[in-house]
Image: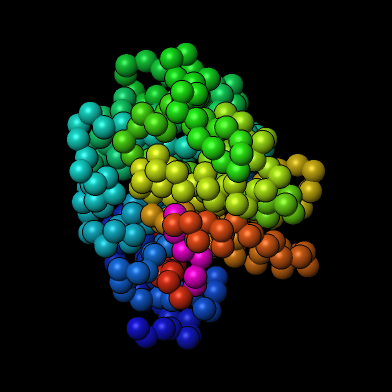
């Protein structure tokens, strides 16, 4: 496998989004090559005008970013084919669950990103009402701009606290001696899409990305904080999470590198999406993006032992030699 050692731009035509530049970035030791069976592809799509750098998001550009990322990830030329390939053995009655991060309105998964995913899913033939966008509780979702809907029309937006859902207490699992129950939204869905935010956390955790995002899918996350790396790795190795996860999309339109250590706030704008089928590889690239921003502010690098633990248990890889990174820069 030939590895690229210099910055190499390849111009491609892209319908409706101006020019596309495909390049290596973020790390000189991440491979850029055709994916083989033992490689995990991660696509980072950037658009300088996806946000104003402060607060406002351009939903048209976000949709273009999402469309291009899925085509690059799957090597499909059409949006329909790309999204259809994301959902193996799809049936009309299948439920697609989308896990977002709405723990704080100051930095949450942006509805514009979720809307772009839903557009792709419906293009591939998914019924809107078979899509459930969820987090812990209804009030957190609505505080972050999601419109509550548990009805039989349209995309459903509700928390695990929704009546008739809750946690699978009868099927609780043992994680390091703690009884943990998964959200019934996960146990009842057929396909799972994880859309976390790009955020540093306390030193104990390092970052909040896709793996930690599932602490919002269980009933007692506080009990798993003491031995976080191993506990979170075990959680993400559970069949209902590992075997159902089809896609990880790290919402990096804005990020939190840690300018205010007491609050999770958007403090820089990468104007990016990080997309992969491999949660560990996606988090590896997300961690590098955060650490590069921290370096620009002369801050210490975040260590994330969780990545190594998770790689050992099977949800994905943190080995840069096994990660194929595609960085796509959209303009226009």
Of residue 82 and residue 307, the one placed in the foreground of this image is 307
Q: Quadrant of residue 96?
A: top left
Q: Is residue 100 visible?
A: yes
Q: Is residue 316 magenta?
A: yes
Q: How is the image coloured?
A: rainbow
Q: Which residues are magenta?
A: 315-320
Q: From the viewer's perspective, tell me whether residue 7 is left or right of residue 76.
A: right
At 45% from the left and 28% from the top, the residue drawn is 171
Q: Is residue 158 above or below residue 326?
A: above
At 62% from the left and 52% from the top, the residue drawn is 229
Q: Is residue 60 above or below residue 95?
A: below
Q: From the viewer's perspective, tell me whether residue 181 is left or right of residue 187.
A: right
At 52% from the left and 44% from the top, the residue drawn is 235
Q: From the viewer's perspective, tell me whether residue 241 is left or right of residue 296.
A: left
Give how far across and how far down residue 312 sits, in percent: 50, 61
Give how far across and how far down residue 62 sits, in percent: 44, 48
Q: Quadrant of the N terminus?
A: bottom left
At 31% from the left and 36% from the top, the residue drawn is 190
Q: Is residue 94 magenta?
A: no
Q: Is residue 318 above or below residue 172?
A: below
Q: Is residue 144 visible?
A: no
């Amino acid at each position: 496998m030939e590895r690229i050692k210099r910055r190499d731009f390849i111009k491609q035509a892209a319908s409706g989004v101006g020019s596309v530049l495909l390049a290596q970035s973020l790390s000189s030791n991440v491979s850029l090559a055709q994916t083989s069976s033992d490689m995990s592809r991660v696509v980072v799509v950037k658009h300088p005008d996806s946000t104003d750098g402060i607060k406002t998001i351009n939903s048209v550009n976000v949709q273009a970013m999402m469309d291009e990322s899925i085509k690059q990830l799957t090597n499909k030329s059409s949006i329909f084919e790309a999204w259809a390939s994301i959902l193996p053995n799809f049936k009309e009655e299948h439920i697609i669950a989308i896990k977002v991060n709405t723990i704080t309105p100051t930095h949450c998964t942006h509805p514009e990103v979720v809307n772009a995913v839903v557009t792709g899913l419906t293009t591939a033939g998914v019924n809107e009402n078979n899509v459930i966008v969820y987090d812990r509780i209804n009030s957190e979702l609505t505080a972050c701009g999601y419109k509550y809907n548990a009805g039989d029309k349209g995309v459903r937006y509700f928390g695990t606290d929704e009546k008739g859902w809750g946690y699978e207490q009868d099927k609780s699992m043992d994680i390091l001696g703690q009884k943990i129950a998964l959200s019934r939204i996960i146990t009842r869905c057929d396909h799972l899409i994880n859309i976390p935010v790009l955020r540093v956390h306390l030193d104990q955790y390092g970052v909040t990305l896709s793996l930690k995002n599932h602490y919002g899918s269980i009933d007692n996350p506080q009990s798993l904080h003491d031995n976080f790396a191993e506990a979170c790795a075990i959680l993400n190795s559970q069949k209902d999470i590992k075997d159902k996860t089809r896609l990880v999309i790290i919402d990096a339109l804005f990020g939190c590198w840690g300018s205010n250590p007491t609050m999770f706030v958007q403090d820089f704008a990468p104007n990016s999406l990080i997309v992969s089928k491999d949660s560990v590889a996606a988090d590896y690239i997300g961690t590098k993006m955060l650490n590069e921003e921290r370096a620009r502010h002369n801050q210490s690098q975040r260590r994330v032992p969780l990545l190594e633990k998770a790689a050992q248990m099977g949800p994905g890889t943190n080995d840069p030699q096994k990660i194929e990174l595609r960085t796509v820069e959209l303009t226009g």
